[in-house]
Image: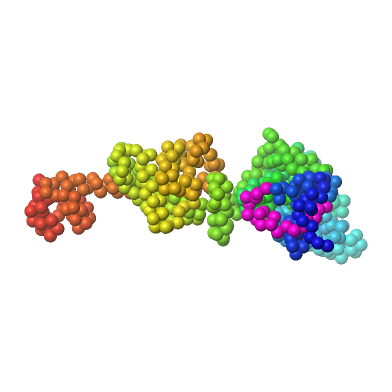
Amino acid sequence: MPQVPIEIQLSTLPDNPGVYQFYDVDDIILYVGKAKNLKKRVASYFNKNHEYGKTRVMVKKIRAIKHIVVPTESDALLLENNLIKKYRPRYNVLLKDDKSYPWICIKNERFPRIFPTRKLIKDGSEYFGPYTSMKTVRTLLDLVRNIYPLRTCNYDLSQEKITAGKYKACLEYHLGNCKAPCVGLQEAEEYHKQIADIREIIKGNFKSSIQYLKEQMKALADEMKFEEAQQIKEKVVILENYQAKSTIVNPKINNVDVFSIISDDAFAYVNFLQLSHGSIVRSHTMEIKKKLDEKDEDLLPLAIVEIRQRFDSLSKELYLPFKVTVEPHLKVTVPQLGDKKKIVEFSQRNARFFRQERFKQIKIIDPDRHTNRIMGQMKIDLRLSTEPRHIECFDNSNMQGSNPVAACVVFKNGKPSKKEYRHYNIKTVEGPDDFASMEEVVFRRYKRLIEEAAPLPQLVVIDGGKGQLSSALKSLDVLGLRGKIAIIGIAKRLEEIYFPEDPIPLYLDKKSESLKIVQQLRNEAHRFGITFHRNKRSKAAINSELVQIDGIGEKTAQELLKRFKSVKRIKGATIEDLTPVVGMSKAKKIYETFHR
């Protein structure tokens, strides 16, 4: 059958919810997506210009479109997730990983053992989890074993073998860690009551265990068994302390999953918290590498489905930062205030901290990826057409109009390139005129780069507000560089970012990496300019002290400084020391001036 043109394939798509699949000329699947309206969503790929490069490339490769109609958008979400796992298309984010997570197993035995495992065996045993770290599992098991005496042996404790006296009480019994059901010292009914309480503790519900232990403590106290009552009290304290540490919101919030997402241009980070009786019983953050220009609204539903399946979550309610379409039986809450809002913000902080840790790790392990990510983020934040791999920043320095200078610092790939820093003495401006000085130095810098056919920066940063930015723009206009070089100004007071011909400044997040690099540029230009200005003032002051001596001009002063390094040494020199540099006559005048 001949290939049907894309236009015809688009025209026959239905207006129903469903899942679409893009195929290339070799019938290899490129992408799977879901849609509330298949016709509108698929047509949008072909009706607009895509800023994101990979999307443009993918659209050019599409030769066939297949679709599956489903009853609702939530059905489409589940089907999309399954198809992505099955076909692993090149342009889809892949959420599944092969990590084996730990579980807590309550073994299907007459006297159940409780232990950690990474293997699930279908033998009727109960499994709780999975947990995101073995540390969490061990902490829970240590808590349980501090409160309840449990067996750790793997004997077959059938009634027949216990009655026959097949076993002997081991060291764990004598240490008080086990009540020796193996020799009939603990009944199965009492043991299973302990297991029921442990089940609730693992689920995050401490109420029944605390109540049971307090009743035991009171009964022992009434029988005057104060030492045993004290031991029970210590266990209650352990349990209450653990509960206090783990409860972070209202204990009435029970059986809830919390999800949040933060992202940049290349990655998204989805944090998952599972709450039981106000306690976080599970936490996990997933890193998602973007393949196309996916939005948070598209990635979060996929991550919710995947994470809930991975951790076998049965929670019936979700707390989310914004509304998304999920399975119809789930209640979605977008909290606006109170404890529910607090826990969503807590999840967002966890996602942000995870992202920061990943950035630190990547900076060490893969510096190129770190640089690419920052450059990509700066392009978005500063509204640039290209990544600012080469940035230059200008700053003026003068003291009440004296010794006016300017500095230009250069950053390559977000890092200082100090060999390319330049100082400028202001030549055409009289008095303290920052605007005219900025105009002069920008003109001189880029006139020279043009003459030398040197690479121009992708971004110029001007230290100052609208006035300095306008002055720099005049020079770019004269040189014909307007529109060829992006230029911004940064004002110190509120860190406003100004753009040409836009009266309203941009305010970046104070923690933004893009703002931090712009601030670093500005601070480096200021430091470099101030150092040069200070040295120039100092030199001028030294020269003035020498040239005030009758017969000593600036050239002679320079020769003396070159030979003696400082005015202090010149003052301490004898006539014999000075004569070889300036001659006998001038040597006497200098000596007499400083030794009157």
Extreme-top residue of the structure: 337
Q: Which residue does the image show at 81% across and 53% down from the upper left? A: 67
Q: Nearer the viewer, residue 379 or 303?
A: 379
Q: Vertical placement of 571 versus 251: above or below?
A: below
Q: Which residue does the image show at 55% across and 59% down from the upper left? A: 368
Q: How is the image coloured?
A: rainbow
Residue 429 seen from this side: yes
Q: Nearer the viewer, residue 423 or 357?
A: 423
Would residue 192 appear left or right of 293 to someone viewing this image?
right
Q: Which residues are magenta?
A: 48-68
Locate residue 521, reporting x and y percent: 45, 48
Q: Which residue does the image show at 60% across and 54% down from the upper left? A: 358
Q: Which residue does the image show at 8% across and 56% down from the upper left? A: 584
* Number of numbered labels in the structure image: 0
Would residue 367 appear left or right of 123 to someone viewing this image?
left
Locate residue 78, reporting x and y percent: 80, 51
Residue 454 among magenta residues: no
The C terminus sits in image quarter: top left
Q: Nearer the viewer, residue 351 or 220?
A: 351
The N terminus sits in image quarter: bottom right
Residue 61 among magenta residues: yes
Residue 193 seen from this side: no
Locate residue 161, reporting x and y percent: 89, 63
Q: Nearer the viewer, residue 414 or 111?
A: 414
Locate residue 154, reporting x and y percent: 81, 63
Q: Quadrant of residue 62?
A: bottom right
Q: Vertical placement of 37 versus 292: above or below?
A: above
Q: Quadrant of residue 371?
A: bottom right
Would residue 376 appear left or right of 337 to someone viewing this image?
left
